Structures are given as C-alpha cells and as structure tokens.
Image (cartoon, helix red, strand yellow):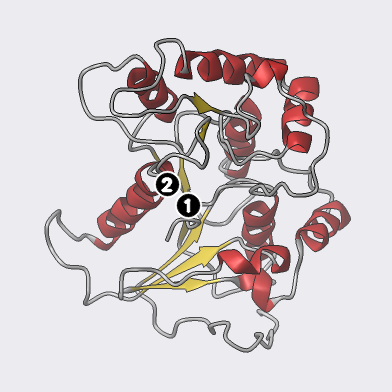
Amino acid sequence: MTPHITPWPGVSEPLEEADLRVLSLGAGVQSTTLALMAAHELVGPMPDCAIFADTGWGPQAVYDHVDWLASGNVLPFPIHRVQAIDLRAQVLDRAAEAEGRYISVPYFLDAGGMGRRQCTREAKIAPIRAKVRELLGVAPGRHATRYRVEQWIGISTDEMVRMKDARETWITHRWPLIEARMSRTDCLAWLARHGYPEPPKSACIGCPFRSDAGWREMRASDPVSWADAILVDRALRARGPVRGMRSEEFTHRSCQPLDEADLRDDPRQTSFLDECDGVCAT
C-alpha cells in the first residue's frame, strides 16, 4: 500500500491510467533513493522500469552502482541502459577536428562565458525519449501523442529550480522527492536508515559544472578519473581554438589547465550537486 503524500502546490499528482511509468535513473543519491523508495512501496504507483542513459564518460563507480541496482534482488522493475553517443570520444574528436559530426560541451572560454551545451540533450534526453518510444511500440517517425507517459525525475527540494515540464505533450514529468518534501540530506539519511550504501556522484568525468569540492574529491578518491579529466582538458587546447571559435576551452572555470587550477572553495560556484539526470536542459 502506497502512503498518500500531499504534494506541494504546483507539483503534479500521479498520472491516472498512464500507459508507461518510467524512472529517469541518473544513479546518484537522489534517483537511487527514489528507485529504492519505490521498491519499498513508499512512493507509487510502481514504475514499469528505470532508464539509465550512459554518456560513455561516467566514473567506474557509477557503472558498478548501476550493476548492483540491476542485479535482480534490489529493484522489482528492470533497468534499461541506453547509449546514443560516446561523449568522451566526441570531445576528443572535436578537439582534434576529426571528420564527422560532433557535439559541444559547455566548456569555459578564455574570452568569457561558456560554449554551447548540446551534451545533455544528445547524450541523456534523446536516448531516454527514444527508449520510451520503443517501449511503447512507436515506430521511428510515427507520433506518440495517443500515449500517456509519466516520467519520474529524482530532483530534491534543494534543486527545485531544475523542475521543468517535458517538451513532449505526451510525457508528464513527476518529482516524487519534491512531493515527499525530501532534500538531498534527507535522501542520504533515508539510505543510511535502510542500510544502503551512499551512491557515487554520477556526473560525467569531464563535466565543467563540477564544483571545486567535487574536483578535490575526484583527485583524492578516484585517481583514474582525475587523470582522464586532465588528459581530456589538455586535449581541448592541443591544437589551439577549435575551428570556428576564437577562444580556447577549459574544463575549469578559472580558464587554467585543470591540474594547475586553484581548487579551493569559492562560494559563488554552482554544480549539479550529485547527478546529471538528463532533464537539466529541457
């Protein structure tokens, strides 16, 4: 029996008679808590599945965590893994000006500002939407408007600014952690009370939105990812500005090489907090 949770004003109720309920799994603290709360029947109706969009550039700890969630004795619903692109390869190909199409990551520019942001839509949103259409049996090029889909998003109360409706009229976003009035700290406490391990941070290794605290943590606890982030950051400038751009690109907001940047705390910084769940650009 699912306890009734009175939602905050402006937060949607469960979608009646949905054709499909999908949990968008970023595999960090919030979406993991949401998935496990569903498994404990603390939020519902039960989703039909979760979808994990692999960008091709996640830390190994995230992939291990998804393996655990999908092991068969943790969640009562399947996890579908989808991947549209290899983001790391895309970044390196773009830096090398290789032939073919590649997408842009919003790196910091030494002339000021940030580059275009295409990674979220192409590596997260598009493959999740394509999988939803496949699960509904909608052929490519056909409309899905006769269906009603409820997509669960693991946004907590400290990230409410990221709540956005789906662009597709046939998809309704739902934020059960908001309904339950849960912050990221509440999620961590819930996991601890139920004996679950703290999930890893699931943003891409070279995500420029990572805070200095996040970079320091990576440097201290995940040397493989730290070395890869440095390698790709250097590659961004190995040939000078990318064709068509006047500015060089940097992973760190200081526009200094990542391994030379000052990683002391800056209160003006923002980050994904925990995970990129694939809705931040919708």
**Residue 249: percent from left, percent from top:** 49, 27
Q: Position of residue 85 (x, y in %)?
A: 34, 33
Q: Quadrant of the C terminus?
A: bottom left
| Circle 1: residue type | Gly
Q: Which mark is residue 278?
A: 1
Residue drawn at point x = 48 percent, y = 51 percent: 78
Task: Choose the circle earlier in sequence order: 1 or 2.
Answer: 2
Q: CA distance from mark 1 to mark 2?
A: 5 Å
* Relative height, residue 29 to residue 217 (above, below): below
Residues at circles 1 and 2 in contact by the CB criterion of under 8 Å: yes
Q: Which residue is at the front of the view, 237 or 30?
A: 237
**Residue 71 placement, left or right of 156:** left
**Mark 1, secondary structure of its residue:** loop
Residue 78 located left or right of residue 129: right
Quadrant in which the N terminus appears: bottom right
**Residue shown at 78% from the left, 43% from the top:** 198
List x then y, in percent, for residue 116: 40, 43
What amino acid type should be assigned to the residue bearing mark 2? Lys
Circle 2: element type: helix
Disc sitting over residue 124 in the figure: 2
Counting labels gives: 2
Q: Residue furthest top?
A: 238
Residue 81 makes an appearance in the image: no
Q: Position of residue 27 (x, y in %)?
A: 60, 45
Picture residue at 20% right of the left edge, 24% below the top: 100
